[in-house]
Image (spheres, rainbow, N blue to C red):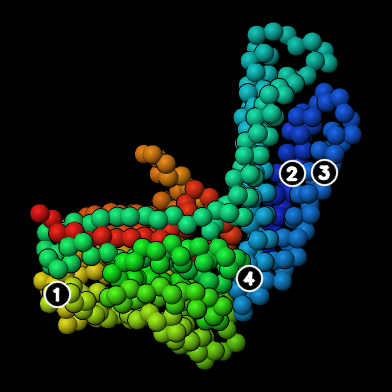
Amino acid sequence: MHSGFFFRIFLFSTIISLLLDWYVFSGLKTFTAGWHSHRLRSAVLWGYPGVSMGIIVVFLFGMRSFDTARGMTPVHEWVLSLFLVLLVSKLIFCIFLFIGDLGRFFYGIGDSLVRTRKKGEPFFPARRKFISDIAVAAASISVTGFLYGMTRGKYDFRLHRETFYFDDLPEAFDGFTITQISDIHSGSFDSDDGVRKGIELAKAQNSDLFVFTGDLVNNAAWEIEPYIEHFRQLKAPFGQYSILGNHDYGEYVHWATPEAKAANFEKVKQQHKKLDYRLLLNENVEIEKNGQKISLVGVQNWGRGFIQVGDLDQALQGVDKDAFKILLSHDPTHWEEKVRYHPTKIHLTLSGHTHGAQFGVETGGLRWSPVQYRYLDWAGPMEQNGRQLYVNRGFGFLAFSGRLGIWPEVTVITLKRRA
């Protein structure tokens, strides 16, 4: 897909945004009706379209410079994010306003049926100001929330602790801890201090094993280079292991030649070595403690609708069927479609990929994210058919330069032998 294709999508989005502006403006006229300060009213009524048009123009020019040979830069992501914040806030405003206008419509019909309308009397009653007040409040909350997500939320790292119980876990590994991070997406970072916060949180856990479950970069191997020394600090007594994610294959940008794409892919793999991570490419290793062993298995990416080069059967070659097995597989749809039904039991699979959509609600008993309509499990633990899965919410971010409600994650997993 070339830049012209993307630009047509951006242009269509802009047209939708402009159509919403017309309706928003009508609501703002109701909202400001009766204000004593005409200057303030004019500032709102003409300031809003000025701000909206300014963001749209920056968006169009910013996306016009989008280079499919390089992919999105942090600047592109900021421009896109501001446009999306504006667009979503307009939609929220218009939904509330439309509900009020729908009520006016049915009131007008009902009123016409029960009495004779006087000449010159409008069919619709006047729009009630409190409806536009609610619309403004809802849109303001949306803007505030998303701006927080863009400025603070994307580096507001949270520690998630999960304990998994097994009947056949070797006794030596009872209490064994694993720190997992996933989806670094180094090409999106725009704050060195923000990245350090997440690394310091992961280091502080002092786990027995460290694993990274894919998407080191957005597209190109050079994206991780400014952060190699940062992530090299993540060490564990039993080693550091990693796998590839769908973005690590360079599939989402245009390469001058197939050779250039292949060279980038080889360099991505070499970057894992520089990070001092052992990259598992459809293979396995044994982790030994006090004379007992578990098998750590790592596959290349396999995802529904994405790259499918992961080969679980190849990765399991040489592994005893009765061995305790932990699988690193980037995309949780691999677990959905292959792992949980595989004749060889994989005790625990660690995945990422979903990012939890970087937006949602996780509070008390309420868990919701738009990504849940695609994935059986989009964040946290799940168990089916005696096989367990954990989906990490991701360390970094992509496209939307922020996180709201679904915060960046460092996971500490504890393995326990069931008594």
In the rendered structure, are the residues bearing label 2 and label 3 in contact, judged by CB atoms less than 8 Å apart?
Answer: no
Mark 3 or mark 1, earlier in chain: 3
Neighbor class of circle 4 (other Cα within 10 Å; few <14, some 14-19, many 20+) is some
Quarter of the image with the N terminus in it: bottom right
301 vs 164, nearest the viewer? 164
Image disc number at residue 73? 4
The image position of residue 249, as x and y in percent, is 46, 78
Disc 3: which residue = 47
Q: Quadrant of residue 325?
A: bottom left
Disc 1: which residue = 290
Q: Amino acid at mark 2?
A: Asp
In space, the residues marked 3 and 1 are separated at their CA atoms by: 70 Å
Q: Amino acid at mark 3?
A: Gly
In space, the residues marked 4 and 2 are separated at their CA atoms by: 28 Å
Q: Quadrant of residue 329?
A: bottom left
| Residue appearing at x 75%, y 65% in the figure | 61
Disc 2: which residue = 21
In space, the residues marked 1 and 2 are separated at their CA atoms by: 67 Å
Q: Does residue 132 sit above or below 216 in this rendering? A: above
In terms of secondary structure, where does tag 4 sit? loop
Q: Does residue 274 sit above or below 102 in this rendering? A: below
